[in-house]
Every structure is written in C-alpha cells, then in structure tokens.
Amino acid sequence: MRVTLALATAGLAASLLTACGDDPANEADPDRPTGTATADPGGLRTTEIATGLDTPWGLAPLVGGGLLIGSRDSAEILHLPAGGAEAPRVVGTVDGVRASGESGLLGLTLSRDQTTLYAYRTGETENGIVAMSWDGERLGAPEEIVGGIPGGASFHQGGALALGPDGNLWVGTGDNGVPEDAQDPDSLSGKVLRYTTQGEPSPDNESGTAVYSSGHRNVEGLVFQGDLLWASEFGQDQYDELNLIDQGSNYGWPEVEGTGGGDQYVDPAVVWSTDDASPSGIASWDGSLWLAALQGERLWEVVASTDPNGAVSVEEPVAHFVGTYGRIRNTVSTADGSVLWVVTSNTDGRGDPDDGDDRLIAVTR
C-alpha cells in the first residue's frame, strides 16, 4: 500500500488550518487540494493528513490520538499514530475476505478499553465479524465471533459497525441482492443487528434473535448521538435515507423507497436524491450528524434536536465540499471530539482518482 503522510496528527492539522485561503471548497474543482488547507462557506476548514490510501473504508479513532484505517480490497488495517511524523503502517490483515464490488473488509470499531478491534468482513457465501486484540502497536490474529450473515453478492453488503453506549455491537447489513429478505424476520439481511461483544444476540433484543430493526436496503453507516441511533441507507433509483432506528421498527424496503409507505413502516428522517448522496459512513461531531456521500461527492451536515417530550426533529441538510475531494466514503470524530476525520473513495473502482488518492482529511471549524 502506497501511503504518504501530509501532516503528522490531527492536532497539528488543526493548528495549521488558520492559514486557509479564501477559495470556497464547496465549488467543484478538477484540481483537488493536495496537502494545503482549504475552507468552505459553512466555516469548515480541512487539511490532508495522509495520501495514497488503497480503498479505505473502516475508521476507528484511538484515545490519545491516532486512527486505525481498514482497506476494503487488501483487507489490511493501518495505524496512523498520534504525535509523530510517521506515515500509516500496516498492523494487521484479515484473512479470507472476499473483495469484489462493494464487498471486502468494511466497518471497524474498538472496544471501550481499546484493547479489541472488531471488523466486518465479507466472505464467499456469508459475512461475519472478527475480533482482534490491539496492544497499541500490532493487531492479534482475527477470531470470528459472528457468522451466518448472508453474503456472496458483490453489492448491498452493508458493513456498518458501531459500539453502542450499552456496550453492545451494532451492525448494519444489506439485502445481499435479495430484496425480499429485508422483510424476512428469519434472515439477517437488510437489518440492523445487535450483538454482545462475545458475538451472541443481545438478550435485550425483543425479537429473540440478533435482529433489532428490518426493512433496510443497504446500511453502511451507524452512529449514536447520545442514546439515539442513526443509520445512513442507500436507496435504489430515487431516494437515499437517514433513519432514526427504533427497536422492532420496519423501514419499508423493498415495499417502499423514501417516505409514504403507510403506518406499518417508519419514514426516514431525511431523504436525498441518489445523485446527491449515496451515503456511506456517518459521524456525530460538533452537535451535528455528518454523512459521507459517494455519488454526491460531498459531506452532508444534519442538525437534529429533541424537544422536552422526546420528539426528534431535523433541520434542512447542508452540503459541504461539493466536488472538491471526489467520492467520500467515511467520516468519524476523533476520540476527544476536536476533529472530524474524512476519508475519500476514489480508488474503489467507481471513482476517478487523482494523484494522491485516496486521502485522509482533517476537518475543523
């Protein structure tokens, strides 16, 4: 993997971002920034941290700084250290990963004590989750803790992975090319799933299985904002979605795409045209939700609020960096919340990579 370091740490990036130019970064520019700080009218400032990444997908921030980065196609995991001038280096590999189309090594998340890394991987016939020990320098051998998630297709593999405030593992899956399975309670396809960190269905799941919610087409992003669980979801031809996930709820796919499915289905909180979004990773940072858009080639900001009665509302989404960096795959807040990390996806077979792609970018206000 060809990786170079543009800036050593997010903290260093933040200190350099005050020297930004005046050109708005949300105007499409065929010459993408290469190592310089840029700003957009929404008050965001960016600096590249590393370049030359190969199909980056999963991101796991480390307490004290630094980041673990997974490569979808090579199944390698890199460590970007904090506080030094080292480029990201390979610290582990997940064997037996089928990388084809949208499949490969997908979501990453760390245990609360940051001694175990969990990774979502796709296989020839089924997908699963592996656990690897992390000592701050190297990853241990992968051990599968969850299996049996339908796989084998080259698309709609989901891949979202998050550790919840309840200490459980939360997983977003795709329909694996069989849309009707999203409505099948006996299938793990097209669902949001909840497991213990030992890989057992959470005993708090009302379904009696790992299934928490159903009717999803392809969930590649999950994030908690307080106790609220949000999911980014790819639509088919018309509408991509941001969904607020509730236990036992059905989000409609394939019976409905977008809103208007009737009382038996939950409408999304936000819908976008598929040309404007194709949302993959999602983060909670600086009071907003942030969605990485692939086809839309932008970063969406959504402000959500809860009234005293518990009702949740969202404001009109705001687009940042439209066309500036190409396809954006994932985003995650640093462990201390000071910086939002964003990773591009121009080397995934559907983009138009420039020299230096793919890139890890630090965003601050």
Image (tube, grey):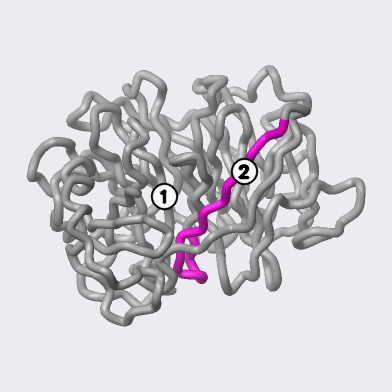
Mark number displayed over residue 331: 1
Is residue 300 inside the magenta stretch? Answer: yes
Q: Nearer the viewer, residue 88 or 20?
A: 20
Q: Nearer the viewer, mark 1 or mark 2?
A: 2
How packed mark 2 is, by other alpha carbons closer than 10 Å (few <14, some 14-19, many 20 or more), is some
Pointer 2 residue: 304
**What kind of secondary structure does the magenta stretch mostly adopt?**
strand
Helix, strand or loop at disc 1?
Answer: strand
Residue 190 falls left or right of residue 106:
right
> Can residue 340 be seen by looking at this rendering?
yes
In the rendered view, tell whether residue 7 sits above or below residue 142: below
Say which residue appears at 39% left-offset and 78% top-offset.
Answer: 28
Give the extent of the magenta segment. Answer: 293-307
Earlier in the chain: of badge 1 and badge 2, it is: 2
In the rendered view, tell whether residue 361 sits above or below residue 334: below
Say which residue appears at 27% left-offset and 69% top-offset.
Answer: 22
> Can residue 349 be seen by looking at this rendering?
no
